[in-house]
């Protein structure tokens, strides 16, 4: 379920973003960024609508997802409900 990032407390959103950044692993780019810089980059992506925060009630966890993955998942759900035999 998508959670509007603007509805989250600032500290909560920062914690979700930091967990996302540190889970992503090692950077291989030429330029290294501080955690604060990375948090701001993710915030800008949220503001531009490139990514979104989701909550999984089963696992009780939040994730940050790319909008493209959301569209693919929505299409897959729609395909499941399409009666192809008709």
Image (cartoon, helix red, strand yellow):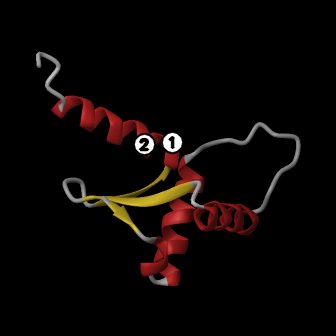
Q: Residues within 10 Å of mark 1 (few under 14, many from 20)?
A: few
Q: Nearer the viewer, residue 47 or 32?
A: 47
Q: At 51% across and 81% down in the image, what residue appears? A: 11
Q: Are marks 1 and 2 in contact (CB under 8 Å)?
A: yes
Q: Is 65 placed left or right of 76 in the picture?
A: right
Decide: is 31 above or below 13.
above
Query: Label 1 vs label 2: CA separation?
Result: 5 Å
- Residue reaching furthest to the top: 85
Q: How many marks?
A: 2
Decide: is 79 above or below 18.
above
Which quadrant is home to the N terminus? bottom left
Q: At 46% across and 41% down in the image, what residue appears? A: 69
Residue 56: horizontal and vertical position, in percent?
28, 56
Q: Is residue 40 visible?
A: yes
Q: At 11% across and 19% down in the image, what residue appears? A: 86
Residue highlighted by disc 2: 71
Residue highlighted by disc 1: 68
Residue 86, labelled with which disc? none
Q: Is residue 8 visible?
A: no
Decide: is 80 above or below 8.
above
Residue 48: horizontal and vertical position, in percent?
63, 63
Q: Residues within 10 Å of mark 2 (few under 14, many from 20)?
A: few
Q: Nearer the viewer, residue 56 or 35?
A: 56
Residue 46: horizontal and vertical position, in percent?
58, 64
Dot 2: element: helix
């Amino acid at each position: 379920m998508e959670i509007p990032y603007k509805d989250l407390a600032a500290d909560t959103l920062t914690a979700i973003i930091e967990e996302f950044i540190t889970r992503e692993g090692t950077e291989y780019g030429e330029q290294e960024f501080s955690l604060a810089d990375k948090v701001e980059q993710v915030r800008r992506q949220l503001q531009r609508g490139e990514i979104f925060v989701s909550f999984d009630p089963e696992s009780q966890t939040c994730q940050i997802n790319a909008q493209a993955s959301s569209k693919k998942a929505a299409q897959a759900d729609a395909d499941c409900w399409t009666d192809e035999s008709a």
